[in-house]
Image: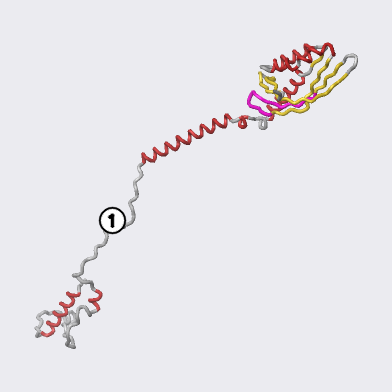
Amino acid sequence: MSTTRHLVNRRRRLATVATAPAVPRTDTAPADEREPEPTAPTTAGPEPAAEDTPEAAAEPDDDAAPVEEPAGDERPRGRLPRPRIRLPAVLCAATVLLGAFAAWAFSSAAALRDDPTRQNTALTDISRTSEVKGQITEAVGAVFSYTYASPGKSDLAAQEYLTGKAVQQHKDMLAEVRAQAPKQKLVLTTTVTESGVELLDGDRARLLVFADQSNTRTGKEEETTYAAAMFAVDAVRRGDSWRIAAIDTFTR
């Protein structure tokens, strides 16, 4: 692109050529192909100042200091470079997090296994609950019933339905009955009216038992007394049957 200074010089050269005498052309080119002769300006006057011409306003000055544009690879100021995240550091952090999660999950699972409320299947295992309830109801009626006419029947029931410390507890509870039975001809009958399985965990169970007891003297004057009893029993499963392992009468 021509600059302002070049444009001014060109106009001066054209004005000088216009005032010089014409030189006959020696070329034989056709008239329509000849380059038109430059003509002098019709009005003489001072050349317009370079600063006043429209071209001068549009053309940039060659002497002006060039404006340096930022290089393409330079980042704008104020924006920080992104830090580079290394893969080994990320893997190490992920390993630590996974290890912590595994430890937490293991401890939580152990706590759930040790929680009695989580182990209790009394409300979920209906068949097992019904089984232990029926067998312990029968066992309580058998071991807590006694007749003076056949004391050995109570002993057989104790051998069949009792185990552990319940054997001695049963002897202590019926000791007075055994002592008075021959003289007063006592007949003790225990009937379970209601029972509920409080805890069922595999082969262990705990039941709350409500029972009615009738004590009848069949001597000269027959007399019957009635009493209600409430106690809890701990039961264990031995083979296919449930046995009473402990008796809790809620007394100290």
Question: Residue 252: x, y in percent?
Answer: 69, 23
> In the displayed structure, would residue 179 be above or below residue 27?
above
Residue sitting at 66 percent across and 18 percent down? Answer: 238
Give the residue furthest to the bottom. 43
Residue sitting at 74 percent across and 27 percent down? Answer: 195
Residue 189, by quadrant, is top right
Residue sitting at 61 percent across and 30 percent down? Answer: 116
Task: Please indicate whether residue 169 sits to the left or right of residue 20 in the image.
Answer: right
Magenta highlight range: 198-212
Task: Please indicate whether residue 143 sits to the left or right of residue 237 in the image.
Answer: right
State the SS at label 1. loop
Q: Quadrant of the N terminus?
A: bottom left
> In the displayed structure, would residue 160 be above or below residue 116?
above
> In the displayed structure, would residue 27 be above or below residue 91?
below
Where does label 1 land, which residue? 74
Asked if one can make out residue 189 in the rendered structure from this viewpoint, the answer is yes
- The secondary structure making up most of the magenta span is strand
